[in-house]
Structure formats: C-alpha cells, structure tokens
Image (cartoon, rainbow, N blue to C red):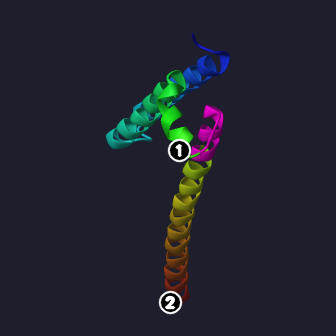
Amino acid sequence: MLFGIQILGMLFGLFMIFLTFLHFKKKSFGAKSLIVWGIIWMGFIFVVLFPSIFYSFMSVLDITRTIDLFVVFGFFFFTVVIFYMYGIVKKSERKVENLVRKLAIEKKRK
C-alpha cells in the first residue's frame, strides 16, 4: 500500500524526470546529463516506493525512520553539490578576471 508521502515522492520524481527531459530538448543538458539525472530520479522513485530495502542498512546505523535516512543522505548530497558549485563559481571568477585584465590592457594600449 502506498502512503501519501510515497505518492508525493513518486510524483516529484516523475516531474523531475520531465524537467530533465525538457532541459535536454532545449539543449541545456547533453546526453550524458540526461542519462545521469534520469538514473538519479528513477533511483529516487524506486527508493521512495520500496523503502524497506534500506531497513537492514538503517539498523546498522541505528536509524529508526526511513525519512531520517533520506534527510541524512540529502545533507550529504547537497553538501557535495554546494562544494562542486563553489568550485565552478571560483573557476568562472578567474576566467572573468583574466578577461577583464586582458581587455583593460588592450584598452590601455590604444
């Protein structure tokens, strides 16, 4: 029997698959991104529909509720995403700084 939170999680996963596909069609994502995000969202749906798979793993970690496990993994996931995005932003800042420096030097020569 599906509970309300499982239905909500499944609908969220399906919506995210749809958004991922839309971004792929708009050429915002490449084929690799489509596949990776598709696997992530299908895995999310699978875990939401069958949380009992994690019960033995949860007992080792002394976690009693499945939602607690999702929260912990969510924090881990978002920490990694934020760290990755920070690296991308810093790389972009260096590129912009070098471009501005190059343009300033060219303008000074003229």
Q: Nearer the viewer, residue 18 or 81?
A: 81
The amino acid sitting under disc 1 is Val
Judge from the rendering whether residue 24 lies leftward or rightward of residue 14; answer left or right: left
Residue 82's image quarter? Answer: bottom right
Residue 97 in the image, given as x and y percentages of width and height: 55, 76
Q: Amino acid at mark 2?
A: Arg
Q: First in sequence: mark 2 or mark 1?
A: 1
Q: Relative to 74, does residue 101 appear above or below in the rendering?
A: below
Q: Nearer the viewer, residue 5 or 110?
A: 5
Give the residues in magenta: 62-73
Query: Does 21 sit above or below residue 80?
Result: above
Residue 14 visible? The answer is yes
Q: Quadrant of residue 74?
A: top right
Residue sitting at x 62%, y 49%: 75
Magenta highlight on residue 70: yes
In the image, taking residue 22 as reference, residue 59 lies left or right, namely: right
Residue that extends furthest to the top in the rendered view of this protein: 1
Say the numbered circle drawn on residue 60: 1
From the image, tell me which residue sits under label 2.
109
